Amino acid sequence: ALGIPSVALLTTAGPGSLAPAFEEWLRRAGATPEGLRRTAADFAPNVDSASRISAEYNVHVSLTEGLAPLGKLSLSRYSLVTLVTTCEDLQDSLAPELALEYEQEGVRFEAVGALLDRDGAKRAVGHKYKKQEAGGDAHASAAAGQLDGAELMARVRAARAAGRAVVFASMGTVVTGDHEEFGWEGRPVGEDGQQRGLTGRELCRAAWGGVFDAFGCADTDAGPLVVVSLGPQQDALGELIAPANAICLPSVPQ
């Protein structure tokens, strides 16, 4: 009613990332796209909610949103533009037929890269669902006595001003969280129902160890400044020893 344009936000690797994600979820669930579409169209709460949204906001939500075709963001046609939080070159490829549908509907996707914080910004980050055993905030307890965001950024700017490179390593919020399958202690489950592969903890520590081996120095001011975002887990590094030129924090400004 106010005529204010709607701008949507997509935080995956572009619109082309959704179809493969849906296919993987369906495969793990032993379901098919056709079966899921039928279920969505017949599921009474889904039908009722779509009717309420249409009546109250004049926004018509498909009962098979995201499923026809698989991975299509039908609601994106209501937005002036959809911002994608990755760069153009890192987007997953979009199927030609789906790209054509978006074009015909006037849907615009703009890859803008990471959304950068302002100094002092606070973010709610991490996939930490379970309560701490002793209570309290996971990030706060993990960061006790360490640099805050402003101090870290001051060191980053000083390093750049001195001509030093800055290396940033982050494993994201999922494998550093506590999701039962994809998190810190989780392992992927195969088609036979058995866990396999590395835990998130093993994967993260292997990656961080590789960064330390490649860029670590014994002198604080030697080599590049290495910044590592560890996530909310207590004692995330385990037996890894960070080199003198590394700063490791539970979270860092984006």
Image (cartoon, rainbow, N blue to C red):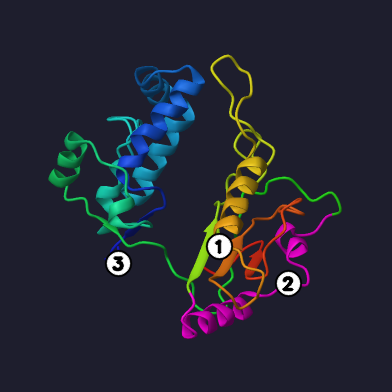
> Is 186 or 135 nearer to us in this picture?
186
Q: Return the mark for residue 4.
A: 3
- Judged left or right of residue 208, residue 94 is left
Position of residue 76 measured from the top left corner of the image (x, y, whole percent)? 29, 48
Q: Quadrant of residue 212?
A: bottom right
The answer to if 184 sits in the magenta stretch is no
- Judged left or right of residue 28, residue 149 is right
Looking at the figure, which quarter contains the N terminus? Answer: bottom left
Tag 2–tag 1 contact (CB < 8 Å): no
Position of residue 209 measured from the top left corner of the image (x, y, whole percent)? 62, 52
Position of residue 87 measured from the top left corner of the image (x, y, whole percent)? 32, 58
Residue located at (30% from left, 67% from top): 2
Measure the alpha-carbon separation of dots 3 and 2: 43 Å
Q: Return the mark for residue 215.
A: 1
Callout in the foreground (3, 2): 2
Q: Over which residues does the magenta segment extend?
A: 135-164
**Can I make out residue 79 in this image?**
no
Residue located at (27% from left, 30% from top): 69
Q: Residues within 10 Å of mark 1 (few under 14, many from 20)?
A: some
Measure the alpha-carbon separation of dots 2 and 1: 22 Å
Circle 1: element type: helix
Query: On the image, numbered disc 2 is attached to which residue?
Result: 146
- Tell me if residue 161 comes above or below residue 141 in the rendering: below
Q: Earlier in the sequence, mark 3 or mark 1?
A: 3
